[in-house]
Image (cartoon, coloured by chain):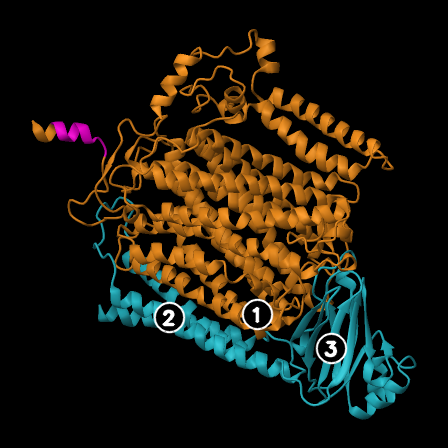
Chain colours: A orange, B cyan
């Protein structure tokens, strides 16, 4: 690497001149201002291209809003924005033969808050960019949920019409999945994984920066669909054809938003894979990697293999909509169930994309806070791989009542039920890690234990739904809504909170308020259960999901659910307050407040700009608590060698 | 330690008992009105027993551990360096595998029995259209009805299709559900075993009127059915019970 860089330095002048003068720098230097005007410029170019082509081919009318939006606003505009903020600068300079500085670190690290608002190549900055962005969308998605819960407090329509209701439900789910859970895990892993590996950064820092900046584009697209003529996409986050094909223009925002979010995920996953495979510190064998690293390794494999399928499914729907192909329209020979097969071939593995990183976080937290090695480390890693493999063979359990081939149901039921085995291994190993530990009931630990118990409920309701006969009765009802929220809220969101509290001192150098943290946990835990547990009941009793109106008999339970959902929303305020105030004024945390062994805790908080002043030498497992004299790593091998010689 | 195990077991039993009460005292399932749903409810209870046992076990260990081994914040000792236990790990791989296999076998048997059509079931076509159901009785010269009327004790085979988007035919009390998909035919069997008035509900999001896509379903005696089918438009299905 260094050799090539030096060769470059000889051929090209070693410096790149930024535009002179403050105004010119503001307008033409990389940044949000250039991003804004370039987005507008590229939108104009895209619009012009569409209209020119349509005019040339003699299509009438020349102006077609949906096509202009798809090409101009949702493809060209974002590319202009990314070019404007400077995400492509290095590559474009390199391609065009202009001077580049491979070792230019001016875009690396954060010296002021402004550095969080530009293309930054530091994985720690990117991690925080991800987390703050995803929590903004979490809040938006949560407010939408409270809005439609208000509608559902009583039978009948009170606040919104059906299209708005369907839009709120669909955008809520889409934001929570594509803009919160998946990228929040990517953010935590971005921050923690390179540090845990003993690496100075991710393998491809510029790609990492690009991955992050694709995300707000997708999020804005989903939210902006409310402004589209006809309202937001209302075919659910699953966007089943042919309903999606007859939806108003908002559906195209979903089709394209998923592309940007998916591209972001795929690039990040490739980056993690290369980083984990090639950038481990000396001595960091696979069997010495912390389980968070293992979890992100398997997650990244899932993302790389599965995500192209959802991209494909949404392109097909969009082509059916605006190019009048007929992939999924029976009148033109299309196959309706084809959509569901392609969609779920991604979206079932996506459940594990939203779960495995959480397993990793919980393993770190439980082991550290119980002061014990994780129970059955190797089986914990292998069970992740087991879920990875099995996860690809269960997609059609979402289609037991979809009318697919009957013979496919029993095999898919068996694989689905078998996933309980590796998952069970993980749950039992966490509880065994607690056994006879010295348990510190800190906020991250509370969330981790809350996760273990709530996730068991989600897993067990998954067994019900895995069984074909029960699924035939319970699918498409509120039982499903309860199940996915126990898995994704009681599961994923609890682990995200555990991870945030756990690494908060490392990220900011300050400690959060433990009392507020505990208050946040208990408020969330109680209101979560009151919100979602009764949904099992109304679902089994006969209330279908995704309805704006329902049978009078379910009125009382729905009212309780709505009240609890507002309490759940309010509990988030405690979290935001705690984070904001502690980040600014919290007590200094020190480098290792949890006395953890993994590498990120062996450097200062926040860590130095390139993480390690000297590459650590890994000499043992990551969780050797209680083993006399055991160490995970030697932090300055050279100094220790010198000491040994002297 | 023996005392500890007893305490742990006690916590587990208390949780399990409480959950059992919640499971039994609340009526979680709608009254079954079909033979198929009777069998499905059997699988449901089987899965519920296993679920209560597993949840009680895990929660009991978590609560017991926190209660027994919680230390103050300033404690800086480590726990015992237990790295694993092969026997236990085999045990908790094997036992869940056996349990889920059992659920799988029971489910497969029930699925097969619920899918076995007897001789000459009543043929009903269910056609979904935004936002109403149409039922066509092919055995009775394609009589059409917006309400579903079935004779009790007689197996009915629903053949479904849709003229626009995907709908899903569901009568909660029958426990059976199947999507009506444009372009293909799907089918499901229902053998009503209880007379009464129920609701046909669309279970798959189908657009603006999804929540209101409902129809009445009446299970009546064979005699009432015979009189209804001769002149279905004259009497709505609710009125049948008055005769």
What quarter of the picture does the C terminus of chain A occupy? top left
User: What secondary structure is found at the residue carrying circle 2?
Assistant: helix
Viewer-proximal residue, A325 or A487?
Answer: A325
**Residue occupying the point 50% across, 31% down:** A209
Q: Is residue A460 above or below residue A65?
A: below
- Mark nearer the viewer, 1 or 3: 1
Q: CA distance from mark 2 to mark 3?
A: 46 Å
**Mark 1 crowdedness (10 Å alpha carbons): few <14, some 14-19, many ≥20:** few
Report the side of A547 relative to A586 (left or right): right
Foreground residue, A303 or A325?
A: A325
x 77%, y 32%: residue: A50
Write down the quadrant of residue B173 in the picture: bottom right
Instruction: Report the Cα–Cα distance between label 1 and label 3.
Output: 20 Å
Looking at the image, is mark 2 or mark 3 nearer the viewer? 3
Q: Which residue is mark 2?
A: B12
The percent position of residue A471, horizontal first and vertical second, equals 59, 70
Q: Chain of mark 2?
A: B
Report x, y in % for residue A616. Answer: 25, 34
Q: Are marks 2 and 3 on the same chain?
A: yes
Q: Is residue A638 magenta?
A: yes
For the point 33% across and 60% down, the residue is A429
Q: Which residues are magenta?
A: A635-642
Q: Is residue A367 above or below residue B85?
A: above
Residue wearing tag 3: B158
- The answer to which of A345 and A467 lies nearer the viewer is A345
Q: Chain of mark 1?
A: A
Please report whichever mark, 2 or 3, sits nearer to the chain's N-terminal start: 2
| Viewer-side label of 2, 1 | 1
Determine the residue positioned at 44% across, 38% down.
A271
Q: Secondary structure at mark 1?
A: helix
């Amino acid at each position: 690497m260094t050799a090539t860089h030096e060769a470059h330095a000889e051929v090209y002048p070693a410096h790149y001149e930024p535009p002179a003068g403050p105004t010119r720098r503001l307008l033409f230097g990389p940044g949000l201002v250039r991003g804004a005007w370039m987005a507008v410029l590229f939108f104009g170019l895209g619009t012009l291209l569409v209209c020119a082509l349509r005019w040339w081919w003699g299509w009438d009318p020349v102006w077609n809003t949906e096509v202009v939006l798809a090409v101009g606003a949702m493809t060209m505009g974002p590319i202009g924005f990314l070019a404007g903020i400077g995400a492509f600068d290095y590559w474009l300079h390199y391609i065009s033969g202009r001077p580049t500085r491979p070792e230019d670190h001016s875009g690396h690290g954060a010296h002021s808050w402004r550095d969080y608002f530009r293309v930054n190549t530091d994985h720690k900055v990117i991690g925080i960019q991800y987390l703050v962005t995803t929590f903004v969308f979490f809040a938006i998605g949560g407010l939408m949920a409270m809005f439609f819960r208000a509608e559902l407090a009583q039978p009948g329509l009170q606040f919104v019409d059906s299209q708005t209701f369907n839009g709120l439900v669909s955008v809520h789910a889409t934001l929570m999945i594509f803009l919160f859970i998946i990228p929040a895990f990517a953010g935590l892993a971005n921050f923690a994984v390179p540090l845990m590996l003993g690496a100075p950064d991710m393998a491809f820092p510029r790609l990492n920066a690009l991955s992050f900046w694709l995300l707000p584009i997708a999020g804005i697209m989903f939210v902006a669909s409310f402004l589209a003529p006809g309202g937001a996409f209302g075919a659910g986050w699953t966007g089943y054809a042919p309903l999606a094909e007859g939806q108003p223009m908002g559906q195209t925002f979903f089709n394209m938003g998923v592309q940007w979010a998916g591209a972001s995920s795929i690039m990040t996953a490739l980056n993690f894979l290369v980083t984990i495979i090639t950038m481990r510190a000396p001595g960091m064998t696979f069997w010495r990697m912390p389980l968070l690293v293992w979890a992100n390794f398997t997650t990244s494999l899932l993302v790389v293999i599965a995500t192209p399928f959802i991209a494909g499914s949404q392109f097909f729907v969009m082509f059916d909509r605006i190019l009048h192909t007929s992939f999924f329209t029976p009148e033109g020979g299309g196959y309706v169930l084809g959509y569901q097969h392609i969609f779920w071939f991604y979206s079932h593995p996506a459940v594990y994309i939203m779960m495995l990183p959480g397993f990793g976080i919980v393993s770190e937290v439980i082991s550290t806070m119980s002061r014990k090695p994780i129970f059955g480390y190797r089986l914990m890693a292998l069970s992740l791989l087991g879920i990875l493999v099995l996860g690809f063979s269960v997609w059609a359990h979402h289609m037991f009542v979809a009318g697919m081939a009957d013979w496919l149901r029993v095999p898919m039921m068996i694989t689905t039920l078998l996933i309980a085995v590796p998952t069970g291994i993980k749950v039992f190993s966490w509880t065994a890690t607690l056994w006879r530990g010295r348990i510190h009931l800190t906020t991250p630990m509370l969330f981790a234990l809350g996760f273990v118990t709530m996730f068991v409920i989600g897993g067990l309701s998954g067994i019900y739904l895995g069984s074909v006969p029960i699924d035939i009765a319970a699918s498409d009802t509120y039982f499903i809504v309860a199940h996915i929220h126990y898995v994704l809220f009681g599961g994923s969101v609890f682990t995200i909170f555990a991870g945030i509290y756990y690494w908060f001192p490392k990220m900011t150098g300050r400690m959060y308020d433990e009392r507020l943290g505990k208050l946040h946990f208990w408020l969330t835990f109680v209101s979560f259960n009151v919100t979602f547990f009764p949904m099992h009941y109304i679902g089994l009793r006969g209330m279908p999901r995704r309805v704006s109106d329902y049978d009078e008999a379910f009125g009382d339970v729905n009212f309780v659910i709505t009240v609890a959902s507002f309490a759940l929303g309010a509990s988030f305020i405690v979290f935001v307050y705690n984070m904001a105030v502690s980040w600014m004024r919290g007590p200094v945390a020190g480098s290792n407040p949890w006395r953890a062994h993994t590498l990120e805790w062996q450097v200062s908080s926040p860590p130095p700009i390139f993480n390690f002043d000297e590459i650590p030498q890994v000499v043992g497992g990551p969780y050797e608590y209680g083993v006399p004299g055991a160490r995970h790593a030697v932090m300055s091998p050279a100094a220790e060698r010198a000491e040994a010689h002297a | 330690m023996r005392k500890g195990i007893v305490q742990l077991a006690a916590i587990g039993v208390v949780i399990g008992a409480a959950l059992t009460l919640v499971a039994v005292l609340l009526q979680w399932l709608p009254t079954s009105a079909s033979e198929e749903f009777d069998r499905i409810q059997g699988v449901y209870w089987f899965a519920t027993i296993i679920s209560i046992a597993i949840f009680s076990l895990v929660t009991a260990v978590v609560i017991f551990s926190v209660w027994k081994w919680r230390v103050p914040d300033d404690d800086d000792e480590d726990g015992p360096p237990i790295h694993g236990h092969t026997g236990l790990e085999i045990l908790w791989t094997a036992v869940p595998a056996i349990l889920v296999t059992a659920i799988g076998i029971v489910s497969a048997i029930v699925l097969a029995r619920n899918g076995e059509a007897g001789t000459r079931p009543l043929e009903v076509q269910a056609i979904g259209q935004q936002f109403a159901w149409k039922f066509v009785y092919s055995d009775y010269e394609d009589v059409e009805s917006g309400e579903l009327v079935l004779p009790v004790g007689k197996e009915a085979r629903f053949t479904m299709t849709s003229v626009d988007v995907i709908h899903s035919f569901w009568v909660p009390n029958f426990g059976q559900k199947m999507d009506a998909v444009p372009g293909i035919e799907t089918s499901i069997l229902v053998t009503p075993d209880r007379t009464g008035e129920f609701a046909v509900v669309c279970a798959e999001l189908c657009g603006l009127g999804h929540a209101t896509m409902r129809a009445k379903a009446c299970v009546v005696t064979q005699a009432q059915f015979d009189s209804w089918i001769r002149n279905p438009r004259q009497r709505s299905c609710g009125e049948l019970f008055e005769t």
